[in-house]
Amino acid sequence: MKKKYIKEMFDFTKNKKETIIIGILLIVQIVIYALSYPFIMQEIIDKAIPEENIGLVIKLSILLIGIVIIRFLVDRYTEIKRKKCYYNNNVEIKNKLFKSIQNAKMSELDKIQAGNVFEIVSEQAWEASHLFVWNLLGIISVRLTSTIVISIILLILNIKLGIIIILIFSVSYIILTPIYFKTMKIYKKLHKIMIDLQGNINEYIESYSTTKTLKLEETNLSQINNKLTEYKKEVLKSNKIIEMHNGLFSLLSFGAVISIIIVGGNELSMGIGMAATIMLMVDYTDDINRHMQELLEHVHNFNNRYNCFLNVLNMEKMEKEQDKGLKKLDNIENLEFKDVTLSYDNKNVILDKISFKVDKPVQVAIVGKSGAGKTSLVNLIPRFYDISDGNIFINGENYTEYKLEELRNKIAYVFQEPVIFEKTIMENIKFGNRENISEEQIKEVCIKIGLDSKIRQLPNEYDTVINSKTDLLSYGEKQLLSFARAILKDADLIILDEVTSNLDLEFENAITKATKEILNNKISFVIAHRLNTIKNADLILFIDNKKIVEIGTHEELIKKHGYYFNLYMSKEQ
């Protein structure tokens, strides 16, 4: 375990103080019980019983029963507290992860699969919540403390036998160390396999239609089977190592008991030993064996949960969006790109020296071949990604001077794929909008864009629950629903990212109608797949080879007989 993670692990949740108190209680009760039990038993067996002192036997027995009851009550109390702590830890860890995901840079989220996120947030967060309050306490406050105290008692009872037993179990610890590191690597590999497996399963679900169309079922099953086979192989390897250690440990424990019987029996026959001492030595040897076996289990669980914690920590430490802006943004009157360059990896340039300026109201169309960087350009406006060089100005101010929330509140974005949540239609349209929007306003917008009549045909009308996969609404109707949401936001700047590319002519006309409604008196950026939908744009930007190679109106660009003209004519044909 790396030192730099130790403090992180202790400070990751708010239950550190309570956990330490639990640990102290456990240590105190272990020490009191371990120190009192052997001497009370020795008095009973070697003194009270031989002298037939019934009163002393009863008193010592009552004392021992009292100690056992107190130990039981402390154990129950600390176990309840520990469970409360790791349930609280689980909630806190999940909240941290959700917050981290919400605040992470888009470039960070691009690196991980949805299935990976699910595995870490659900299963691994739960395992990590046990790490400090369960495994670390189990190792330090219970197992190690018990083993040390018992070792001291063994030395007090019989120094020769105590040394022999301690040496035997020390050898066991030496055997444990390389196994610890071996299992650490295995658990790390197992977690990676499970994360990859969750990612693959999520991909298969998301691409279900493609899988059926391309008949990839056997390929997908083969990939899943390979992952599961690899997982089984690593689990069996881990179990083999653990069982090997358990076997060796049991052999050494048996050797310790035999040593006590031989040496202790010899001393007893010579009249220099006591039967109670031999019985206690055997009993305590069994205790050490049990504690060491449980310690081994805690160590293996610790390895597993420590790796889970590292995965949780890595996700929690994803680079956050930088929001150093302090200014309020009342409205967006104009927007300017000045020599803007974008690279996602600081190596490959996506956009190079982009410059233009627009004033409200204006409709800007962005065209170019697939992969030219059209979506990358508009994604810079709401600051989904940070620019690599240059500046973007809003109302003459560098747009990073504005609070991020202020900026995004003034922008509405309709994506190529409609964004639908598993909520009612009414809740879907309201989602992300101001709370004071009335149902009448929502219905009025739906009437304007031609969606109301379809909604009225549904069983519960606007209260019908839908999701992204439901067939209650067609693809085009779901896109219209996204438009309704954007219209109600009443933002100053609108981004439409190829919103008609997957629609038939009927819904393209409906979207065109909705577009007129949403773009009225706004600054808008429309990425167009079909050029006939943007002929009336105030400004057309043609992007090619990472740059704006042409800029102007439809008529101006047609007259140039350049990039736009060639693309337009090819589309017409």
Image (cartoon, helix red, strand yellow):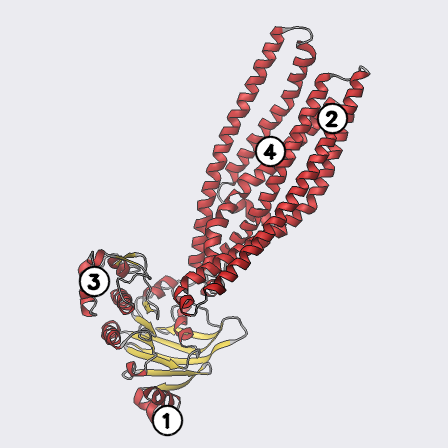
Q: Amino acid at mark 1?
A: His
Q: Nearer the viewer, mark 4 or mark 3?
A: 3
The disc, 1 or 3, on the residue closer to the chain's N-terminal end is 3
Sequence-first disc among 3 and 2: 2
Which sits earlier in the primary sequence, circle 1 or circle 4? 4
**Disc 2 residue crowd, few under 14, some 14–19, many 20+, Cα 10 Å:** some
Q: Which residue in the structure is indicated by mark 1?
A: 561
Residue beneath disc 2: 155
Q: Nearer the viewer, residue 5 or 442?
A: 442
Q: Residue at x 57, y 37 (%)?
A: 137
In space, the residues marked 1 and 4 are separated at their CA atoms by 82 Å
> Which residue does the numbered mark 4 point to in the structure image?
142
Report the disc number at residue 455. 3
The picture places residue 124, in percent across and down from the top left corner, at 50, 49
Name the residue: 66% across, 49% down.
Answer: 181
Residue 309, x across and y down, in percent: 54, 49
